[in-house]
Image (cartoon, rainbow, N blue to C red):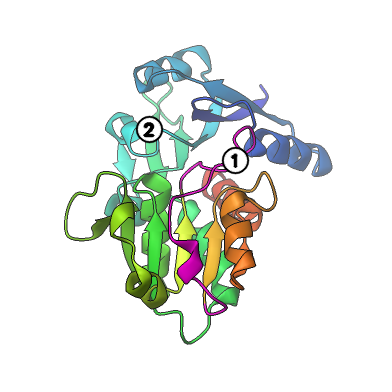
Amino acid sequence: MMKTYGLIGYPLSKSFSQKYFTEKFEKENLKARYLNFPIASIDEFPELLTHHPYIGGLNVTIPYKEKVIQYLDDLDPVSKEVGAVNVIKVDWTNPKEPKLTGYNSDIIGFTRSIQPLLKDHHKKALILGTGGAAKAAAYGLKSLNIESKYVSRTPKGDNQISYQSLDKNTIEENTVIVNTTPLGMYGNMDAKPDIPYQYCGNNHLFFDLVYNPEVTAFLKAGQEQGAVIKNGLEMLHLQAEGAWEIWNK
């Protein structure tokens, strides 16, 4: 039986993962396939394993990186601390009750991708968004000794601030700015997070998890102020390979 892997999320109109793994399987002559599972509600998740009993592993994307945890049997220590999962390993040792374990390869991809661009003055960061990807970015930045705060439209807690509160001092102090929102992705390419770009400069590093288009409106605005920019494509490659390692270890 051909091993099946896949991606859950909604919507899944543009899936990097499916293209990446399909090409990988062909190139490496692996008897496997990668399917998209666009589920409109996380409540549909349990049915996947019923209908596809040979799934070896799953990726998880927006908006289920946190919601899927309730259906898992175990979490690795990192995803447990972060509170978000983007990789699920399925163990079929007991065919009647497969064991589902959650991992987070977003952290691997993000950390390895941003690290080469960091300079000594990059000590504090703003993370735009508060979802599962934002939590992975925060964990990665912490491992690189960079303090971070979340920026949210509806901030909650001490470590979240509002977009309206972003003033000159805040922007100049936080020289790493990471966009984890879907704003600016293909289909809505003119959109960008509402921050005061005019206070950014050549000390800033802009990192966007969006990879299509190559230069988002967010990155372009940063670049025009002299910031170093990077999109999420390399991160995606690195997290995908991280997922493959997890499924096959």
Q: Residue at x 25, y 56 (%)?
A: 160
**Amino acid type assigned to the residue bearing label 2 in the image:** Lys
| Label 1 element class | loop
Q: Which residue is drawn at 46% across and 29% down?
A: 92
Classed neighbour count for the residue bearing mark 2: other residues with Cα under 10 Å, few (<14), some (14–19), many (≥20): some
Q: Residue at x 54, y 70 (%)?
A: 205
Where 99 sits versus 249, above or below? Answer: above
The reply, left or right, for residue 8 in relation to residue 160 is right
Q: Position of residue 226 (x, y in %)?
A: 61, 73
Q: Position of residue 79 (x, y in %)?
A: 35, 51
Q: Residue furthest left?
A: 157
| Alpha carbon separation for disc pair 1 and 2 | 35 Å
Q: What is the chief secondary structure element of the magenta stretch?
A: loop
Q: Nearer the viewer, mark 1 or mark 2?
A: 1
The reply, left or right, for residue 25 in relation to residue 201 is right
Magenta-drawn stretch contains 30: no
Which residue position is annotated with label 2? 99
Q: Nearer the viewer, residue 41 or 5?
A: 41
- The stretch of residues the image draws in magenta is 181-203
Q: Which of 206 and 195 is in front in this view?
A: 195
Q: Marks 2 and 1: in contact by CB < 8 Å? A: no
Where 232 sits versus 142, above or below? Answer: above
